[in-house]
Image (cartoon, rainbow, N blue to C red):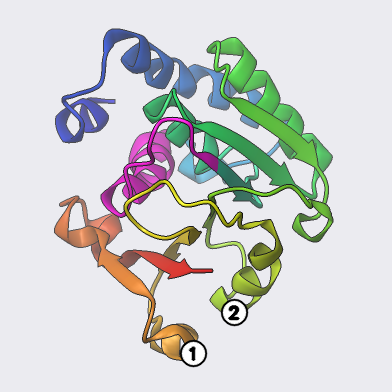
Amino acid sequence: MELIKAYFPELNEKQLAQYEALYDLYTDWNSKINVISRKDIENLYPHHVLHSLGITKMMKFKSGSTVMDIGTGGGFPGIPLAIFFPEVQFHLVDSIGKKIKVGQAVAEAIGLENVTFRHCRAEEEKQLFDFVVSRAVMPLGDLVKISRKNIGKEQQNALPNGLICLKGGELQHEIQAYQKQAIVIELGEHFKEEFFQTKKVVYVPL
């Protein structure tokens, strides 16, 4: 939790209390439904919350924006982002019902009012959004294919509407087809923990 405070000193008391509550909630739910690897739960803040907030280094969503999180699992990156951007509407989608149930329970427990959830495959969701976000759920090309139908035409943010995803490791091959329009941010330049040395945020306009 200290990491979150150190990297984001602008957070207000309500937001800090919501982030603070995540540890006990996820620890409790994780003992019933495995949404985070058992070994990794004590790294909830660096590996899951802070990692999700890496997207803020690419984009500060404007008030009134709409964002869909594909393959959210138990709510990452959607829930940490929804706490960070209370004026932005988030829609979290996952094909595994029990993971969506965890996300809903956590959001409800911390009083998050700017999130909706749907248990379905991303291909089935037809609503339009300004952005789609995702955390390493599939190769970039597949994400682009699935997300394209969900991107609305009306622009209101600093970057054109599109896909913003969290990726790790060697991306040269995946990014090749989008080299001209893609923007890649190295999270290791923003967060000093070793975990972030290979982590990136990738934006592709759609």
Query: How far apart, in angstroms, are the residues tagged by discs 1 and 2?
Result: 8 Å
Residue 123 at what x, y percent from top left?
79, 61
Q: Is residue 74 visible?
A: no
Q: Bin the neighbour count of mark 2 within 10 Å (Cα to Cα): few under 14, some 14-19, many 20 and up.
A: few
* SS majority, magenta: helix
Q: Mark number for residue 20?
A: none
52 relative to 160, above or below? above
Q: Residue at x 15, y 30 (%)?
A: 6
Q: Which residues are magenta?
A: 42-66
Q: Secondary structure at mark 1?
A: helix
Q: Residue at x 42, y 60 (%)?
A: 160
Residue 157 at what x, y percent from top left?
38, 48
Quadrant assignment for the N terminus: top left
13 relative to 165, above or below? above
Q: Is residue 2 visible?
A: yes
Residue nearest the viewer, comparing 33 with 205: 205
The residue that label 1 is drawn on is: 177
Residue nearest the viewer, comparing 129 with 15: 129
Pointers 1 and 2 in contact (CB under 8 A)? yes
